[in-house]
Image (tube, grey):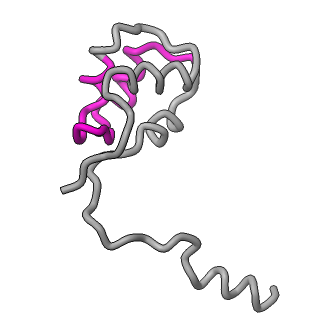
């Protein structure tokens, strides 16, 4: 192991900010835990209680999925687009 590699392990790759914490998980993180295609009911069983970050504040995934009107998602992209159509896309509010 070279000295450069040991230094990289000691320092964080990305420096974290000191701002207010944001409640909820990014939608992409929740979507990455699922396999596709997927029925809405199965997503609710697996991740329905997950709180996701939205521009209007944290929301429960199951509540958002009810508003989509989609019962089957062929792909992760289709899932994220349907959720974003309900919650919007933009900066996430902080405390």
| Side of 39 where 88 appears, left or right | left
Q: Which residue lies furthest to the left in this view?
A: 95
Classify residue 20 by image quadrant: bottom left
Q: In what quadrant of the picture does the C terminus appear?
A: bottom left
Query: Toward which corner of the image does residue 84 lie, by quadrant?
Result: top left
Q: Is residue 92 above or below residue 11?
A: above
Q: In the rendered view, would you say 7 is above or below 86?
A: below
- Most extreme residue toward the right is 2
Foreground residue among 18 and 5: 18
Residue range (magenta): 37-65
Q: Residue at x 31, y 28 (%)?
A: 87
Q: Does the magenta run of residues contain 5?
A: no
Image coords of residue 31 (percent x, y) = 49, 33
- The image shows a total of numbered marks equal to 0
Name the residue located 24 percent from the left edge and 23 percent from the top edge. Answer: 63
Q: To which quarter of the image does residue 2 belong?
A: bottom right
Q: Is residue 46 magenta?
A: yes
Question: In the image, residue 69 lies at what x, y percent?
Answer: 34, 8
Task: Pick out the residue farthest to the bottom.
Answer: 3
Relative image position of residue 5 (x, y in whole percent): 74, 82
Q: Which residue is drawn at 40% across and 15% down?
A: 40
Looking at the picture, tell me which residue is in the foreground, 32 or 91. 91
Residue extending farthest front: 90
The x and y percentages for residue 88 are 34, 29
């Amino acid at each position: 192991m070279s000295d450069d590699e040991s230094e990289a392990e000691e320092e964080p790759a990305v420096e974290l900010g000191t701002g207010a914490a944001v409640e909820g998980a990014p939608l992409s993180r929740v979507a990455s835990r699922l396999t596709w295609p997927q029925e809405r009911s199965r997503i609710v069983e697996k991740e329905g209680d997950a709180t996701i970050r939205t521009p209007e504040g944290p929301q429960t995934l199951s509540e958002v999925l009810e508003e989509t009107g989609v019962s089957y998602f062929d792909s992760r992209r289709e899932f994220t687009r349907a959720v974003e159509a309900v919650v919007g896309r933009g900066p996430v509010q902080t405390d």
